[in-house]
Image: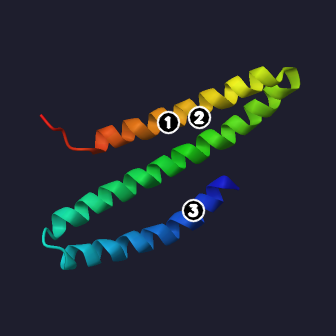
Amino acid sequence: GAKEFLKAEYAICFIFIAVMFIIITFLTEEGIWTAIAFLIGAVVSVICGIIGMVIATRTNYRVTFCAYNSLSSAFRTAYRAGCVMGFALVSLGLLSSPSSS
């Protein structure tokens, strides 16, 4: 279910990204460089969405299973999954940003 949702959502997103890439290329002073920066940001956003959905769907089962034993165990599992998504998002942001050295 989640994978099919992402396929449908990103099919529309990719059309929007392509149109905006063309518009940005021709209507900004920096042209292609601004459009490339937009494209990199859009791709990183898509990757983060995919990672987030995968983590969320896998974690739902684990949290439900842990909740049978104790609520603190379920909370700990859900919290750790959220931390993983946060670290993934920050890591992709740092990897996609230019170095300032």
Looking at the rendering, in which quadrant would you find the C terminus?
Answer: top left
Mark 1 → mark 3, Cα distance in angstroms: 23 Å
Its colouring scheme is rainbow
Residue 38 is situated, as x and y percent measured from the top left of the image, at 30, 61
* Residue at position x 51%, y 64% in the image: 10
Q: Which residue is mark 1?
A: 86
Q: Which residue is mark 2?
A: 82
Q: Amino acid at mark 2?
A: Gly
Residue 94 is situated, as x and y percent measured from the top left of the image, at 31, 38
Crowding at mark 3 (Cα within 10 Å: few <14, some 14-19, many 20+): few
Disc with the residue nearer the chain's start (2 vs 3): 3
Mark 2 → mark 3, Cα distance in angstroms: 23 Å
Q: Amino acid at mark 3?
A: Lys
Q: Are marks 2 and 1 in contact (CB under 8 Å)?
A: yes
Q: Quadrant of residue 34?
A: bottom left
Whether residue 94 sits left or right of residue 28 in the image: it is right
Q: Amino acid at mark 1?
A: Gly
Whether residue 28 sits left or right of residue 1 in the image: it is left
